[in-house]
């Protein structure tokens, strides 16, 4: 093969590699085949020489506009955080609402895989919950109304996780809803405790979430994952809640925990091929 034709073929293979048209190891094989091993030796020499390039011990950082903007933004946020209580209530509400909305917009504008998207959506979700509770507390709302606000905040978290493909936000939303549900049942059961009533509060919720997770897998695998594991955690809701009630018998609580741990372990092991692909790209477990 003449040199001109060989050069055309190797440049075409390099183009395939750069644009991911073929896997890199296939491109290496083709290059070695057409250059008789010269490409591999050249690449090895280039990597070796690049690894031994001398780096300067000191270099001045480049002043980029985005880093200056981030630094100024952090300065403003720190100032507002330290002097937040000095502002009027109307100004506090305006700042919380503006920052929450801004962080949500930035979180959706950034790339889904970028860390900035996770950061902005996390900050927006925290501000939505904590800032709202703070404002409601200043206005003198009672616990029931604050809990209802948190229910609405958890629903927004759940929808945000679905729309932004951040399923951990949806999982946190379900855990938050379970915690708020536990608060309501705790208020009802604290003075009139009965084990059958406590289990009746939590077992239907756990069974419903687990069944939804199993049924939903064919439609939306990630959504089914958060439903399934939320249901597994809801199995222990009655025991966690009973731990803080003095009337609950400790020995009976321990027995129920043993039973629930056995049930959860049985479900996880028997359904291992169902949930394992959520955490690994490997073949199903045997």
Image: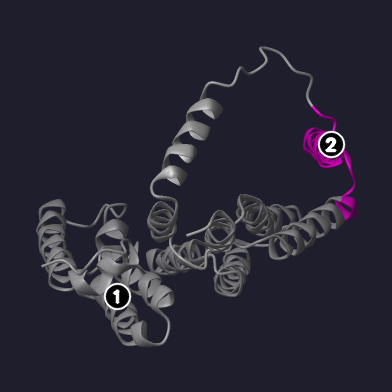
In the displayed structure, 166 sits above or below 118; it is below
Q: Residue at x 42, y 73 (%)?
A: 222
Residue topped by disc 1: 206
Rendered image quadrant of residue 97 = bottom right
Q: Which mark is residue 64?
A: 2
Magenta-drawn segment: 62-91
Number of labelled discs?
Answer: 2
Residue 108 visible from this viewpoint: yes
Q: Is residue 209 left or right of residue 261?
A: right
Q: Main secondary structure of the magenta part?
A: helix
Q: Is residue 131 left or right of residue 77?
A: left
What percent of the width, then of the height, locates residue 52? 53, 21
Q: Residue at x 29, y 82 (%)?
A: 214
Rendered image quadrant of residue 205 = bottom left
Residue 193 visible from this viewpoint: no
Q: Of callouts 2 and 1, which one flags the residue occurring earlier in the amino acid sequence? A: 2
Front-most of 233 and 72?
Answer: 72
For mark 2, give the secondary structure: loop
What percent of the width, then of the height, locates residue 251? 10, 53
Front-most of 183 and 158?
Answer: 158
Q: Is residue 171 left or right of residue 89?
A: left
Front-most of 189 and 224?
Answer: 224
């Amino acid at each position: 093969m003449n040199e001109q034709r060989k050069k055309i073929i190797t440049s075409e293979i390099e183009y395939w590699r750069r644009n991911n048209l073929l896997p890199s190891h296939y491109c290496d094989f083709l290059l070695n085949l057409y250059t008789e091993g010269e490409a591999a030796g050249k690449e090895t020499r280039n990597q070796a020489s690049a690894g031994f390039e001398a780096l300067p011990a000191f270099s001045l950082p480049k002043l980029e506009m985005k880093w200056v903007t981030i630094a100024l933004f952090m300065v403003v946020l720190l100032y507002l955080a330290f002097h937040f209580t000095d502002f009027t209530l109307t100004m506090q509400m305006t700042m919380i609402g503006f920052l929450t909305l801004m962080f949500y917009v930035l979180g959706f504008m950034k790339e889904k895989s970028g860390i900035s998207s996770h950061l902005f959506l996390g900050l927006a979700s925290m501000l939505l919950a904590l800032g709202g509770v703070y404002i409601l507390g200043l206005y003198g709302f009672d616990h029931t109304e604050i809990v209802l606000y948190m229910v609405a905040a958890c629903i927004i978290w759940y929808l945000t996780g679905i729309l932004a493909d951040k399923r951990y936000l949806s999982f946190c939303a379900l855990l938050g809803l379970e915690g708020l549900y536990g608060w309501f049942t705790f208020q009802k059961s604290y003075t009139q405790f009965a084990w059958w009533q406590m289990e009746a509060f939590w077992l239907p919720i756990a069974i419903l979430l687990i069944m939804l997770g199993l049924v939903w897998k064919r439609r939306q695998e990630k959504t089914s994952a958060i439903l399934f594991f939320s249901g597994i955690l809801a199995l222990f809701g009655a025991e966690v809640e009973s731990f803080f009630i003095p009337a609950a018998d400790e020995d009976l609580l321990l027995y129920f925990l043993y039973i629930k741990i056995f049930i959860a372990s049985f479900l996880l092991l028997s359904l291992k091929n169902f949930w394992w692909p959520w955490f690994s790209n490997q073949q199903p477990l045997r």
